[in-house]
Amino acid sequence: MKRTIFLQDENAVWLKGNLHSHSTMSDGRLTPEEMKEAYKHHGYDFLVISDHDRYTNTKNMTEEDFTMVQGFELYGNATNDKDIHIHILFDDNFDEFEHGQYIHLPERTGVATKAFCEEMRAKGAYIMLNHPHWSMLTSAEVEVDSFYHAVELINYESEWLENVGDGTVFWTEMLFKGARLWGGGADDNHNGDPVDSMYSGSFGGWTVVKAKDRSANSIIEALKTGSFYTSTGPEIYDFYVDGDEVHVVCSPCERIYIGGQHRCHQRKIGRHVTEFVTKLKGKEKFVRAEVMDAAGRSAYTNPIWLD
Ligand SMILES: [Zn+2]
Ligand SMILES: [Zn+2]
């Protein structure tokens, strides 16, 4: 039996997008229109303007070859600096909020925030825990059965500028605890410096979905079902388990790693490795792949659970 998280549809499209960015509607320096042009120019297919505690409605900015996906980022600050930033994305049918409306978490954590996020999820929203490392969160502080669909693995602006944007260890620990969470990467760009400057937080971390079509609704559906990968450089073309074999197909890399539980790590290393086929060790509860190019940039698949 073949198992994969990628959508199996011969008409499916691969779409590169930035799930997390801030405009002049909150603390970003660029307008939504300027950001859309910058990301179009850099070959992206979709963009989320996810302003802090405020909904920037960009539905009417979608074009035939570029999709605006809706959402916002809510935060709960704590006196001990352990912030929680929660990403809430939704499709075009979701009409709870109006353009420019401020939305706040009821509290940093606790029953009211949990109830609010569960309500959003029940109404169809996609929910991601943002930049856990920047927020100084540990995996012990997040429940296994939470309302989150995903953890932000790559938060490029905080990684590039402050070296605190890598959520991969947090995510791995959550997976080891038994959580079923997708990954996800984004820029979280505020554009305090020009987009092409050394200090730009743009174009360094992204998510590539395999979706039914280019619509915002299909992109949200792909996110919810895990039909995507996260990258800072390499491309992943396929990842599946067929019987007792794992298959990874990617752009030329130096390393391909297979990870899972019970020290089931495997790897293939070489100059231009584009494929790795290997037998499972047999104790994996899930498998995921990470591929790394010669520049040290990585792409991450979502896990395939084997139960
Ligand atoms: Zn944030
Ligand atoms: Zn942000």
Image (cartoon, rainbow, N blue to C red):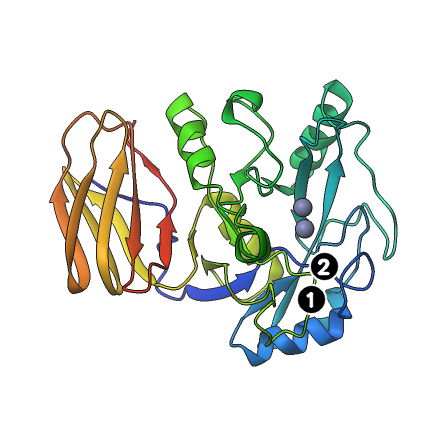
How busy is the neighbourhood of tag 2: few (under 14 within 10 Å), some, or many (20 plus)?
A: many
Q: Farthest residue toward the bottom?
A: 41
Q: Is residue 77 above or below residue 52?
A: above
* Rendered location of residue 280, percent (x, y): 15, 36
Q: Quadrant of residue 137?
A: top right
Residue holding disc 2: 22
- Type of the residue with mark 1: Asn
Left or right of 209? Residue 95 is right
Residue 63 appears in the figure: no
For the point 59% across and 77% down, the residue is 196
Which of the image's four quarters has the C terminus? top left
Instruction: Looking at the picture, tell me which residue is in the foreground, 226 or 87.
Output: 87
* Rendered location of residue 257, percent (x, y): 24, 46
Q: Farthest residue toward the left?
A: 279
How busy is the neighbourhood of tag 1: few (under 14 within 10 Å), some, or many (20 plus)?
A: many
Residue 106 appears in the figure: yes
Instruction: Looking at the picture, tell me which residue is in the foreground, 94 or 266.
Output: 266
Q: In this view, does 111 lie above or below 75?
A: above
- Type of the residue with mark 2: His
Q: Distance between the residues labelled 1 and 2?
A: 8 Å
Residue holding disc 1: 191
- Give residue 88's mark: none
Which of the image's four quarters has the N terminus? top left
* Rendered location of residue 7, percent (x, y): 39, 53
For the point 42% across and 36% down, the residue is 169
Label 2 beta carbon less than 8 Å to ligand 2: yes
Left or right of 132? Residue 292 is left
For the point 53% across and 71% down, the residue is 44
Give yes or no for contact between labels 1 and 2 (Cβ–Cβ under 8 Å): yes
* Rendered location of residue 83, percent (x, y): 69, 34
SS class of the residue under badge 2? loop
